[in-house]
Image (cartoon, grey):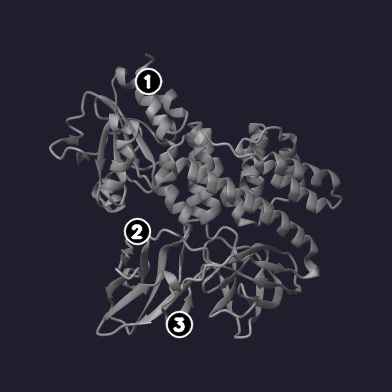
Amino acid sequence: MYKFFLIQFVFLFSFLNFLHAQETVIKGKLLGYDNKPMKAANVSVRNINSTKVFHTEEVLANGEYTISIDKHGFLYLIFSGVDHEPVQIPFLNDDDKNLEINVSLKLNEYEKDFSDLAVIGDFNNFSFSAPLEMIKNKNGTYSVNIDYSGDSVRYQFIGLVEGRSVNGIESIGFEFDRESDYCSIILTKNNKAKITLDPKKLIRKKSEEKILLDEQIKFDREILKRYIIDERLKDDRDKKYSAFVTQGNFPDDFIFDWTPYKNELENLISNTENKRYKKFLILLYTNLQQYNVVGIDSTLFTYLLTEIPYNSYLWSMKNYVLTKAISYLSEEDRITYVEKVLSESSDENTKLILIVNEFIEAKLKNNEPLQRLYFDKLKNQYKNSPVTEIIENQFNPDRKIKEGVEVPSFNTISLFDSTKTYTKENLLGSVYLIDFWAVWCKPCMAERRYLYDAFEKFQSNGLNIISISFDKKEEDAKKHIINSKQNSWINVFIPDGFNSSLTKDFEIVVIPKPFLVNQQGKIIAIEEQLRGKALEQTLYKFLGNN
């Protein structure tokens, strides 16, 4: 589970480009839910594993657009419009062509509860970690006053639409945010401005996006059809999973019925003659195994290794399948395959995925030579990638915080009793697990039952846990803790979270990040050894059985 999370991180956040190709020109119309031009709209292109677009064109006042693309590979065309939900279309740009794509967007689906409504903008450098809370007024509107020295200020709301920052209603104009949404612009007066939202002005209508693709890309259309179905199912599963965990349920108890989709894919694979399309279907089919779907033929993974070229965009789409496929190879064949991809492939995305995967695999096996080899490749070949920064901070073989070193000094105050403090010194003589966590952190919440079970089994053997909350407010942590078994161990709160000196001392970049400390104050286990089912095995190693 832990390695899978890291590989997914590479998929979502690496910023790499495909090779150049002949120019493709795409024309068409981009309209709103009512089939009319929108206040502002853009057609953009981005790589499949980047959040930022590398090229965008503004849509004309009549809804028409033209965009040229000079990169090849599997890209996303992003169709965006003010007050509308963006559409992203996967597009295989493997040769030059002239295409027509017409899109009508659906309206934003606004939240019913605005209790988390906040605003970001020029005044806080669009910081998601420090938004300004919108205050509810007696007339039902929301507002906040800001100080800003410019003549105008850009802003976006968070908490208005699930999972995205979006434009507001009050605006003299809109600016594309280079991702998929817009900033609203308002004027300032005497270096001050008031940002407001009137929920009554939000348009709440049921609508659906409409996509009409050019006949020239019939295969791409079939890929798109299957890809959208696959993504919507995955999104549906993820939303249900998120709701399930948020309600306090244990992640491993979650069940999502993939059987109808699995059967549909099996039928399509059996009846599809186009070899290229069949490979794509098999890719989707084998990708289901990451959700523990039973009955997936493991031989299909190695089949794909022989059928899909090293530099195919398909590997970047479903990186789980690639990493799973090479796991079926012998160690010698695996190393040979990976090195061949790294030396011969022109697909930088696949190469990055493999380097990270092999680095984590080597780390899990405590293979220090291979771990150093792939870590150095990552640093030397992808030094500007944010993925490299995360891994370097989190897993650098030369980092200060690792097994065998003394735990950094800390001085924390009990979340429930301000007269009690917990330090490195007063915890000497006990074995304790430091748990950096937050209620908003879904991977953290996914670890809760493992922690509950471990504490129950090993408390009598001397185990203690100190959970350090990174929540925005103490109340958020308290609300969860009081109603859970977590109330049985030590809980503290760090007001500055990721900006605290404690975070820097422990080299915390992401959470959860657990440490196991022995009686002498030395770190004896870290990271994946203390996550999921591995936690109990590690504790048994150091504390024995009851």
What separation in Å lies between label 3 and label 1 (alpha carbons)? 60 Å
What separation in Å lies between label 1 and label 2 (alpha carbons)? 37 Å
Closer to the N terminus: mark 3 or mark 1?
3
The three-letter amino acid code for the residue at tag 2 is: Ser
Image spot of residue 345 (x, y percent): 66, 53
Closer to the N terminus: mark 1 or mark 2?
2
Image spot of residue 484 (x, y percent): 34, 34
The three-letter amino acid code for the residue at tag 1 is: Lys
Q: Quadrant of residue 151?
A: bottom left
Image spot of residue 481 (x, y percent): 31, 37
18 left or right, relative to 238: right
The three-letter amino acid code for the residue at tag 3 is: Gly
| Disc 1 target residue | 457
What separation in Å lies between label 2 and label 3 (alpha carbons)? 26 Å
Image spot of residue 364 (x, y percent): 49, 33
Element at badge 3?
strand
Numbered tag placed on residue 173 in the rendering: 3
| Disc 2 target residue | 129
User: Relative to 481, does residue 278 appear above or below in the rendering?
Assistant: below
427 left or right, relative to 230: left
Tell me, yes or no, if residue 514 can be seen here: yes
Q: Nearer the viewer, residue 280 or 70?
A: 280
Q: For the residues carrying marks 2 and 3, which lies nearer the camera in this image?
A: 3
User: Relative to 257, does residue 93 appear above or below in the rendering?
Assistant: below
Residue at 53% of width from left, 49% of height from top? Answer: 239
User: Relative to 390, does residue 514 appear above or below in the rendering?
Assistant: above
Instruction: Please tell me how crowded label 1 is: few (under 14), some (14-19), or many (20+) other residues with Cα within 10 Å.
Output: some
501 left or right, relative to 19: left
* Extreme residue toward the left, this view: 419
Instruction: Please tell me how crowded label 3 is: few (under 14), some (14-19), or many (20+) other residues with Cα within 10 Å.
Output: some
Q: Nearer the viewer, residue 504 or 366?
A: 504
> Quick one: quadrant of the C terminus?
top left
